[in-house]
Amino acid sequence: MANSDSSNNFDYLYKKENKVRCLQCGRCAAGCPAAHVFSEYNPREVMRRVQDGEEHELHKDPIIWLCGQCYTCNSRCPRNNNPASIILQARERAYKQGHAPAEIYQQSAALLESLFLNGVTVSPVLLKEKLGVLSELVDVERLTKLRAELGLPEHNSREVPIPAKAIKQIRTIITSTSGQGERANDA
């Protein structure tokens, strides 16, 4: 049976031998796109906090939501540390304990609803209306025009609809894994 506390999946990140490997050289920060955009974000600082034993408080800090999860920091580290994985674990803990920004919960609900109803997570409609920063980064008008040029429907990300059997299977998975059981009767 799977453990419901996913933080256990990341325990290896916090073992003493892994925490002391970080030399604070700064290669992670030097290559981090988020650190170049957000002055308050620095993966080296995240590693320092973990070394200082603060990993169990990291999930309460809003800086964890500035990371783009590109894993550049992991690939640049000469000691094979995992700042991006530490941040991912902190995000999971924050989400489960109610410390994530309201926008994250709203976006999560929109993606889950789209998957439940349509069998796809991201569609042009979601990009236009409900995905926060991601919506700001995507030129929906250009995307819609490109879809038309390719002969694709404007609002559906699939030319061929997902078979009803597959939708039913998707809904079964969502219902059994996310506590969305009451939704099964709505569709």
Image (tube, rainbow, N blue to C red):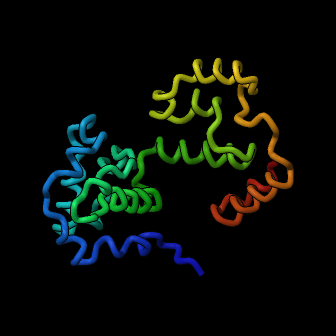
Q: Give the vertical position of 156 relative to 104 (above or below).
A: above
As displayed, is residue 143 above or below residue 67? Answer: above
User: Can residue 105 be seen at all in this image of the molecule?
Assistant: yes
In this view, which residue lies farthest toward the right?
A: 164
Q: How many discs mark residues in the rendered view?
A: 0
Describe residue 168's horizontal placement relative to residue 127 as left or right.
right
Residue at the limit of the structure toward the bottom, as seen here: 1
* Point 51% across, 30% down: residue: 135
Q: Tell me where residue 59 appears, x and y as whole percent.
A: 34, 58
Q: Visible in this render: residue 60?
A: no
138 left or right of 11 in image: right
In the displayed structure, would residue 65 be above or below residue 36?
below
Q: Residue placed at 54% from the left, 42% from the top? A: 107
Q: Where residue 146 sits: x, y (%)?
A: 64, 21
Instruction: Out of 10 and 30, give the one closest to the viewer.
Output: 30
Residue 69 is situated, as x and y percent measured from the top left of the image, at 39, 49
* Location of residue 174 by image quarter: bottom right
Please indicate whether residue 28 sits to the left or right of residue 86 in the image: left
Q: Residue 160's image quarter?
A: top right
Q: Residue at x 45, y 33 (%)?
A: 133
- Front residue of 175/158: it is 158
Residue 154 in picture, x, y percent from top left: 72, 24
| Viewer-nearest residue: 170 or 158 | 158
At horizontal 30% and vertical 41% (from top left) the residue drawn is 34
Residue 39 versus residue 90 in the image, above or below? above
Judge by depth and name the residue closer to the eye, 160 or 56. 160
Image quarter where the N terminus lies is bottom right
